[in-house]
Image (tube, rainbow, N blue to C red):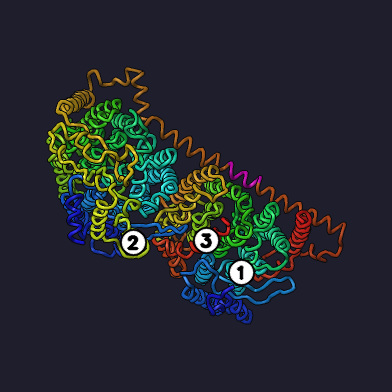
Amino acid sequence: MDQLRDANWVLSVGTFLPLAGVLVMLFIPKAEEQLNKAVALITALATLAVGVYTLTQFDYDQAGKMQFVAETNWISVIKSTYYIGLDGISLPLYFLSMVITVLVMIYSWNHIPSPGNPKAFLILMLVLQTGMAGTFIAQDLILFFVFFELVLLPMYFMIGVWGGENRQYASLKFFLYTMFGSALMLVAFLALFFKTGAESFAIPYLVENGGAIAKNTQVWIFAGMFIGFAVKVPMFPFHTWLPDAHTQAPTQGSVILAAILLKLGTYGFMRIAIPILPDAAVEWAPWIGLLAVIGIIYGALGCLAQSDMKRLIAFSSVAHMGFVMLGISTLTSFGMNAAVFGMVAHGLITGMLFFVAGSVKERYHTLEIARLSGLLKQVPKLGWILGFCAMASLGLPGLAGFWGEFPAILSAYNPAPGLSEEIFRVYMVIAALGTVFAAAYLLWLYQRTAFGEPNPEFTSHGHSDDHDEIHDVNMFEWIAWTPLLIAIVVFGVMPNLMFKIIDPAVATIVAGIGG
Amino acid sequence: MFAASEAAAETAAVALKSGWFLENAWIIPIIPAVAFALIIFFGKKLPMKGSELGVLSMLASLVFAAGAGFQWIDRVNGASEEQFIDPVIKTWTWWQSGGFDLTIGQHIDGLSLTVLVVVAFISSLVQIYSLEYLRGDRRYTHFFASLTLFSAGMMNMVIADNMIQLILGWEIMGLCSFMLIGHWWEDGANSRAALKAFFTTRTGDIGLLVGTSILFFSANSWTQEHLGVSGFSIRGLSAWALTGNPGSVAITAGAFALFAACIGKSGQFPLHTWLPDAMAGPTPVSSLLHSSTMVVAGVFLVARLFPVFYEGMNIYGSSMNFITLIGGITIVIAALLAFVQNDIKKVLAYSTVSQLGYMMMGLGAGAWLPAVFHIFTHAFFKACLFLAAGSVSHSGSHHSFDMKKDMGGLRKYMPITFVTWVISTLALCGVFPLSGFFSKDEIIDNVGHAGYDVFMIVGLVGAFMTAAYMTRATYLTFFGEPRGAAAGEHHEEDSHGAHDSHDDHGAHDDHGAHASHGPHESNAFITVPLIILATLAIGAGFLNATPFGEKWENMKKWVEPRPVVVADMDHGSVGEMRGLRTADTMPATTDTVVATEDTIVVMEEGVSGEAKTAPLMAAAAPAESASGEEGHGEEGHGSHSSECGKKTPDAGVCYAPYVKHAPFKWSKAALSMLIVFAGIILSWLVSVQLYTRKAGFFFGLTKRNKLLAAGHAFLVNKYYLDHLYEKIIVRGIAHPIAKGAYWINQNVLDGVVNGAGIGTKGIARWVYRNVDQRVVDGAVNGSGAVARGAGGALRPVQSGKVNQYGALLFAAAAVAGLVLIIINT
């Protein structure tokens, strides 16, 4: 591998710096809450600084190539190496994970969920950050798997300890379901390793040699990966862990889950499953597309049936990730570009929606849609932000969501050679129908919660102690949210900021399928 | 080189003029977009609460648009008779995918400038009017912000160089209509109307997304090769549609899909139901969005991509196509509904729907210019009518819009409003020589001339009905005895407030501003816009006064694209195309003036080298243009290279199809005048019987005759379409279907998961008890509590459950992996 730059330390530092913060925090007593928070935030900011440095050092003319590549021996007994690198697909997601962690940290400054203990909470978040960033840069399947699994535990504890009333069920379900998928994925990785001559787990090596595997075998190996990634995405019908996990998770957990964790699955499809097993991908694509469009409609229907705001947003993730998967399933550069854009856009927008839901819950102590109304009157700024996010989420052009949604629909008209045009054109129409459903559930949500007069239950001041006076967006919220809100507009207006990076990298992958 | 180009100019074409405003027309939508942001963030701190920014940005846009308009006229006048007037196109890379650069930019031609000027003009007047109408409103700043963003969206759509940019503007308008219709969202009816408007148009937008996709992939390789633009480009799609290359299925499917979007946006049957409900918004909103701008977006799209519809819908190919059918149905059903409305704004809303039907029908029958001209004239008189209705409610009927309850006899109190209303009504009815006559009559005439005979009759029937329902509304509002609020009665709460969405007084905070509650004339903020609009309602028609001969047909000259074959890249690589390509790769802009000079050089090459293109340019036969009044119809246009749209041009591309023009005949005009006057007189007589004498044959007719009663009920219930949509489709999906899907989710899909969990637990127990006592010793004891309370973070690690399941899963996976490897070896 030619190393584009000498600065190949940046990725390792960017990935493992949070663990250094964890190490420091281990020596700080639990009672020193402010100090713990400060150390965690500084660590996250330092990590972000490394991320920004990565952005500045990235060679945008070579976005299709792996950059900052580092490769050293790791577990030589199973021929696994510490092999990392970053291209135009990884970069936006890698950077997004850093941004989201910082913003969540800021939000956490005065929003540590019950039962408190910021030290443990923030340590978990830093560990999570390492796992997320590592997944996006790993170029070795075992390394990928380790990072992929590393994400699981902190999230399990976040939901299980700081979650809502039904947290035990939700966290266990989350953990086991994902674990189940991971297990099959690991099997697939092992099979791949052995079928390519037990030489290496390195992704570039496997991409080169994976295509030589007999088609039938490829299809089986793909099945294993499919389950692993599809659970994570989550695709219909493997999505049932998601609404529970989201609903029960603390706000911070929901945000990270929606913004980053779901992308590990779609990223896996693009980075591993499809390039390594191109023949199998062509076989599987119509089925993935089918599940994707079912997910779009089904997720929307699920949203319409919800009476809880957070659960509704959770279901909307199923629908949105359906668009991402539809894009991927076309195996075209249009589709995959849309998918990567969609991943980031969904991360920004749905992350933001969960922030808003968290703040509504904090103020009203409920997320029951029927009890909320007149947000625009009582907390006008929060109401406006909710409206803005709803509009972004339903794919309004000019905001980021559109660029994940419309190109995905577009791409389905003309899938890769070897895929049935008729089938995908049907998917296209169904997906387009999904945009109407998205408008329906989001606007209906907005109409019910933001419009109208505030519920008298929450307007009576002072006569009972169970509700604090309901205040509008506070400073920490503004600091945490503003970057996301700006990003949603900026990427919506100037989508090429991201497409420019993604397109060459996607072209590399698609070229592999064609060959 | 200069000499060479001059020589070329003599033989073929003159260099097209351009100018700063034309080249920089893309600034026009940016001005209000920036103003929107400023109003949102700083508006409340400004002395006039941000409204000044809105008004100023509109006026600035108007200046820019007018400047560009004059430069365009200059460009056309400077060109030779038979030359294709290149639109002024500028593009920048907006996004890229699959190695294609996809652009954002401007596509300025006669059509876009016509609509731009109208939008900027009406927006300015409406904003000025709103200064008074919304004075003291609780969301005054937000109102102006939304109104400004709305105009930005419309203008962006109008100048769009490509479909994606068009969709951008299209959807921004959707968003703003949501915000503006639901402006007084405290009232549930208003927010429901807002939702309905957004949702209905969004349903049509499925077609926009699908149609754009179909056309993009069908056209992209052709457009890239021949024009160097993407398959989203308006110009590319237009040229591609007329090449004869498109497979008939693709272009037909694309055209139908796009038309579905137009049905939604332009309130055509059967998706017109949102438009009358949208009257819940403040009256200036109705005037801007629902008469002259947003709802014409669909008509504009058909006009913009006319070649696609021309080929896809086979215009001129038969005596009926989908567009004329929908347009024709819409004219009649909406006009019928206008008869049973009591709300003055709803009469106007249905009237708008009906007039949009005319525009669609005209486009469907190939009457491109009359339809576009009708967009132009209709904007003035309909905006005037809405603003007059607003004036009536503002100062005459104490914020009521109920004609039967709260109006009557207002002509005495509100003379200016009355006169402007009557002028606009006559213009709407198409009375000679007011503006509506010159556009509407031309549509009807051309529809018949193109062989769509049935639809010509529909048009005439529609004209009769228009005259009749407008007379009824005029009578109810301004004649007879004052009733209710118009008579000075004051009622606190509107009884229909609970059921009907409307823009009512309850929504105004500031009652003190209206000291007198009796009817009186509105102040200058309101009357001046009315007078200006009424003047235009009289005069605008003379811009294209076909009856007076060709000299008067300025719109035709300036706006109608000429069906001339133009060389493409394959046939001599036209300079402008080259310019476009450079613009794709560089952030710099294309300089069209330079580009056109290139064109001339190419032309010259064409003369010497490729003989194919030269004759086409030289085909300007001056002989026929001199022919008399009869001649300037179809034959006059025959002098253009009428190949376009009929057969594949083999030497270049066309950007516009050949369209027919009906020769004007006074006899036909007299007939339609007769019909209109019959409508007015008949309706007057009936109105007197019904509303003043309350006696006579027509009074209580619907009560006496069962059939008529049923018809009346059918109309009052709006053909039960709302029932179908809201009660059956929407409720069906939102309730049983969604609930059913969710039930399946919770009980079937999740049941499987939980079942698997419980099953695994069972197996685990069994394994534990019977097979291996050593597995996770003591774990079961600790398995009860997973996580409980503060500081419990690390406890779950010790809890057996996770380990136990994890171990089992991995064991199972290992076995499965082994099996897989064995099978496949």
Name the residue that disc number 3 marks.
A506
Chain where mark 2 sits: B
The residue stretch that appears in magenta: B740-748
Name the residue that disc number 2 marks.
B583
Q: Of helix, strand and loop, which mostly describes the magenta segment? A: helix
* Residue A66 appears left or right of A197: left
Q: Earlier in the sequence, mark 3 or mark 1?
A: 1
Asked if residue B414 is positioned above or below residue B46 in the image, the reply reads: above
Secondary structure state at the residue bearing disc 1: loop
Q: Nearer the viewer, mark 3 or mark 1?
A: 3
Asked if residue A82 is positioned above or below residue B591 in the image, the reply reads: below
Asked if residue B109 is positioned above or below residue B299 in the image, the reply reads: below
Q: Would you say residue A182 is visible in this rendering? A: yes
* Residue B617 appears left or right of B314: left
Along the line of sight, the residue nearer the viewer: B460 or B695 = B460
Q: Quadrant of residue A154?
A: bottom right
Spatial separation of the CA atoms under disc 3 and disc 1: 17 Å
**x and y percent of residue B94 in the render?**
39, 60
Spatial separation of the CA atoms under disc 2 and disc 1: 39 Å
The N terminus of chain B is located in which quarter? Answer: bottom left
Secondary structure state at the residue bearing disc 3: helix
Q: Are marks 3 and 1 on the same chain?
A: yes
Along the line of sight, the residue nearer the viewer: A434 or B615 = B615
Chain where mark 1 sits: A
Name the residue that disc number 1 marks.
A138
**Would you call the spot at circle 2 few (<14 residues within 10 Å), some (14-19), or many (20 or more)?**
some
Is B746 within the magenta? yes
The C terminus of chain B is located in which quarter? Answer: bottom right
